[in-house]
Image: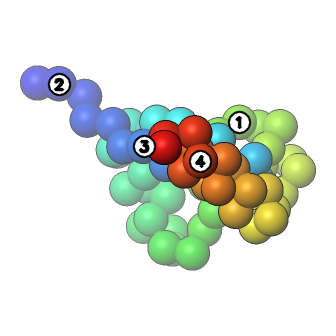
Amino acid sequence: MALREMKLCCQSCGREFTLPQAEIDAYWEQGMDIPVFCSLKCQMKGWDPEAVRWAKYRRTKDSK
């Protein structure tokens, strides 16, 4: 049985990363509005909506 993973966007730096489905389910059991971070460094930095918006914009521009 293959380990299922899900691609997420870090709520601090905007970087895309993957997490195992079981870990994501554990986060979401605590609440759907809890931010998920790619690293401990980003978790300590905290939520940055502007960085997330800018990273999404760069990825969209790069994919064209």
Return the mark for residue 61.
4
Q: In which quarter of the image is residue 1?
A: top left
Return the mark for residue 39.
1
Closer to the eye: label 2 or 3: 3
C-alpha distance separating marks 2 and 1: 24 Å
Look at the image and tell me whether residue 48 can be seen: yes
Secondary structure found at label 4:
helix
> Along the polypeptide, which appears first: circle 3 or circle 1?
3
Residue lying at 83% horizontally and 37% vertically, measured from the top left = 41
Residue lying at 88% horizontally and 50% vertically, measured from the top left = 45
Question: Could you say where residue 55 lies in the image, as x and y percent from the top left?
Answer: 69, 50
Q: State left or right for residue 38 relative to residue 26.
A: right
Secondary structure found at label 3:
strand
C-alpha distance separating marks 2 and 3: 16 Å
Secondary structure found at label 1:
loop
The residue under label 2 is 2
Indicate the amino acid at tag 3: Lys
Is there a contact, CB below 8 Å, between mark 3 and mark 1? no
Indicate the amino acid at tag 4: Lys
Q: State left or right for residue 52 relative to residue 2.
A: right
Look at the image and tell me whether residue 23 can be seen: no
> Along the polypeptide, which appears first: circle 2 or circle 4?
2
C-alpha distance separating marks 2 and 4: 33 Å
State the residue in front, 5 or 64.
Answer: 64
Question: Could you say where residue 63 lies in the image, as x and y percent from the top left?
Answer: 49, 40
